[in-house]
Structure formats: structure tokens, C-alpha cells
Amino acid sequence: MAPGSDGWWADNLALISPWGFALDAIRTPVLLRHGREDRFVPFGHGEWLANHIPGVEAVLTDNDGHLTLTANHLAATHEWLLSHL
């Protein structure tokens, strides 16, 4: 939040307001990573997203939390992104 709190507020607003698109309308490749140890976002939300985004590649792990996804899977995420350019 060093540059400001706008992103934090936008994330919180997204919890209670429409996102402006339907998940079933997504046609772009999506990689969803979520860890069961996440203490910010319930694991059930990751499971719900995985079941509602068409063609999603969901990687739901038991041993990751909100912050360890970046630390543990950044290289694999970059590889996935490069493979979808």
C-alpha cells in the first residue's frame, strides 16, 4: 500500500459489487492458482471460480497461502503466461 490504498479499496469493493462481466463469458485463457492455506480469501472461493470460468486451468494446492503462491510458483506462472502469448 506504499503508493496508496486505491487497490485495496477496489479489492474490497469487488467483494460486494458486480464485476462488470459474467464469468461464463470469459474466452481468454485463465490460470487460477489458489492455496488452501490462504487466510485472506477462502479456499472455497477458489474452488467456486474454478467451477465457473470456462476452460480455466486451476491449480488448487493444499500447502500454499495467499503470499506463498508468488514465492513458490512464480517461475511456473511466467512459463504459463509465455506459453499463451
Image (spheres, rainbow, N blue to C red):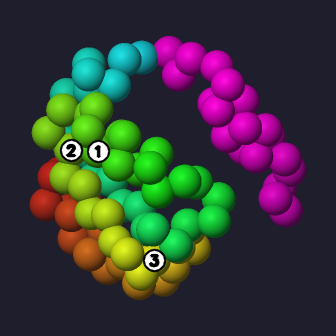
Q: Is residue 26 left or right of residue 39?
A: left
Q: Earlier in the sequence, mark 2 or mark 3?
A: 2
Residue 4 is a magenta residue: yes
Could you tell me which secondary element the residue under label 1 belongs to? helix
Instruction: Tell me if label 1 and label 3 are in contact, CB under 8 Å.
Output: no
Between the C-alphas of marks 1 and 3, the distance is 17 Å
- Mark 3 Cα-neighbour bin, 10 Å: few <14, some 14–19, many ≥20: some
Instruction: Tell me if label 1 and label 2 are in contact, CB under 8 Å.
Output: yes
The residue stretch that appears in magenta: 1-20
Return the residue at label 1: 50
Return the residue at label 2: 56
Return the residue at label 3: 64
Between the C-alphas of marks 1 and 2, the distance is 6 Å
Residue 53 is a magenta residue: no
Residue furthest front as drawn: 44
Identity of the amino acid at label 2?
Val
Placement of 64 over or under 28, stated as above or below: below
Placement of 20 over or under 37, stated as above or below: above
- Mark 2 Cα-neighbour bin, 10 Å: few <14, some 14–19, many ≥20: some
Identity of the amino acid at label 1?
Ala
Could you tell me which secondary element the residue under label 3 belongs to? loop
